[in-house]
Image (cartoon, rainbow, N blue to C red):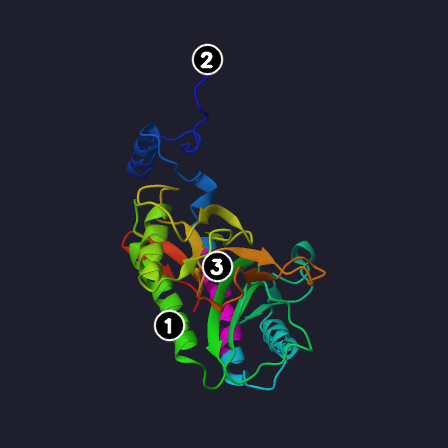
């Protein structure tokens, strides 16, 4: 009977390093470990970091210009123009049929909101702007929440707690710990406020492709999921709903992308691209 195929392999023609042995020890104990291609080289990390600088610039440009009375289609133009001016490409554009360059998700739209001329921002709205950059073949992915003018205390709290969930998830992301540690920490914080943590969507590896391993759930148990080791690059992007964690795809969206909270209460999300180091995560996008 053949044994289970190993995920981790030493470089051909070399003896195992201390790094190799540490990962193989976890694998022998039945833990899910990364494959070697998920460990980015210094050159790849620098490429992802440069892409992250452009991605941050895109969201900074949105922050300078976003206001009540503008359409989400105008936000899309801001993102496209900044990207083009810096030699980059929007990863979302035409990705699996997504028609625009950025996701603009207002109020009860959890994620993947499609920019439209008829979606005009109003006083009190909260909106997530989610952008992914490709620069010289390297990907960086981030999103921010924006409050339009003055909103309700309930929405303000939701936006704040969602950001805290990201920060707490980042603190839980330690080298030689597990993806489940991140989700467990986020879930505990969100539940203090009786918020729902979306389970049908997750963070993900990123860098050489738009979506790579590991899948980063924002709920779960400590010690589960993939082992986190230095050199991995991934996103944490908790989607926090004011009510239920459940979601549905908007039946009126002809592209089948827009995700709505199950009870149509507001939702908030923040996202960073992160590099795992020997000491914790380094933020590559803001």
Q: Is 285 displayed left or right of 227 in the figure?
A: right
Q: Percent from the top left, x then y, of residue 154?
A: 40, 75
For residue 7, what is the image quadrant? top left
Asked whether 72 falls inside the magenta stretch, the response is: no
Of discs 1 and 2, which sits in the foreground?
1
Tell me the quarter of the image containing the C terminus.
Answer: bottom left
Q: Percent from the top left, x then y, of residue 111?
A: 55, 63
Q: Which mark is residue 1?
A: 2
Stretch in magenta: 45-60
Alpha-carbon span between mark 1 and mark 2: 54 Å
Q: Residue furthest front?
A: 263
SS assignment at label 3: helix
Q: Which mark is residue 160?
A: 1
Q: Earlier in the sequence, mark 3 or mark 1?
A: 3
Relative to 72, say whether 95 is above or below: above
Q: Percent from the top left, x then y, of residue 165?
A: 36, 62
Of discs 3 and 2, which sits in the foreground?
2
In the rendered image, is residue 137 in sight? no
Relative to 205, say whether 76 is above or below: below
Q: Earlier in the sequence, mark 1 or mark 2?
A: 2
Q: Earlier in the sequence, mark 3 or mark 2?
A: 2
215 or 107, nearer to the observer:
107
Residue that numbered label 3 is attached to: 48
Local crowd size for mark 1, using a 10 Å CA cut-off: few (<14), some (14–19), many (≥20): some
Relative to 62, say whether 173 is above or below: above
Of discs 3 and 1, which sits in the foreground?
1
């Amino acid at each position: 009977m053949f044994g289970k195929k190993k995920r981790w392999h030493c470089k051909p023609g070399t003896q195992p390093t201390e790094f190799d042995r540490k990962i193989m020890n976890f694998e022998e104990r039945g833990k899910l470990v990364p494959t070697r291609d998920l460990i980015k080289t210094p050159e790849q990390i620098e490429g992802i970091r440069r892409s992250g600088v452009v991605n941050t610039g895109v969201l900074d440009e949105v922050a300078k210009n976003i206001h009540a009375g503008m359409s989400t289609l105008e936000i899309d133009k801001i993102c496209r123009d900044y990207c083009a001016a810096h030699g980059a490409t929007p990863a979302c554009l035409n990705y699996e049929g997504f028609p625009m360059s950025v996701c603009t998700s207002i109020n009860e739209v959890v994620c993947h909101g499609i920019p439209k001329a008829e979606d005009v921002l109003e006083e009190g709205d909260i909106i997530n702007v989610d952008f992914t950059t490709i620069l010289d073949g390297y990907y960086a992915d981030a999103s921010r929440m924006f409050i339009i003018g003055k909103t309700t205390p309930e929405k303000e709290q939701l936006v704040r707690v969602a950001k805290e969930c990201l920060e707490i998830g980042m603190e839980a992301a330690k080298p030689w710990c597990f993806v489940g540690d991140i989700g467990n920490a986020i879930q505990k914080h969100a539940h203090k406020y009786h918020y729902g943590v979306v389970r049908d969507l997750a963070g993900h590896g990123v860098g050489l492709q738009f979506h790579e391993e590991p899948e980063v759930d924002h709920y779960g148990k400590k010690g589960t999921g993939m082992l986190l080791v230095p050199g991995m690059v991934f996103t944490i992007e908790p989607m926090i709903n004011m009510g239920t964690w459940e979601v549905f795809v908007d039946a009126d969206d002809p592209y089948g992308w827009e995700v709505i909270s199950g009870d149509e209460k507001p939702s908030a999300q923040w996202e960073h691209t992160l590099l795992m180091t020997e000491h914790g995560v380094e933020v590559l996008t803001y």
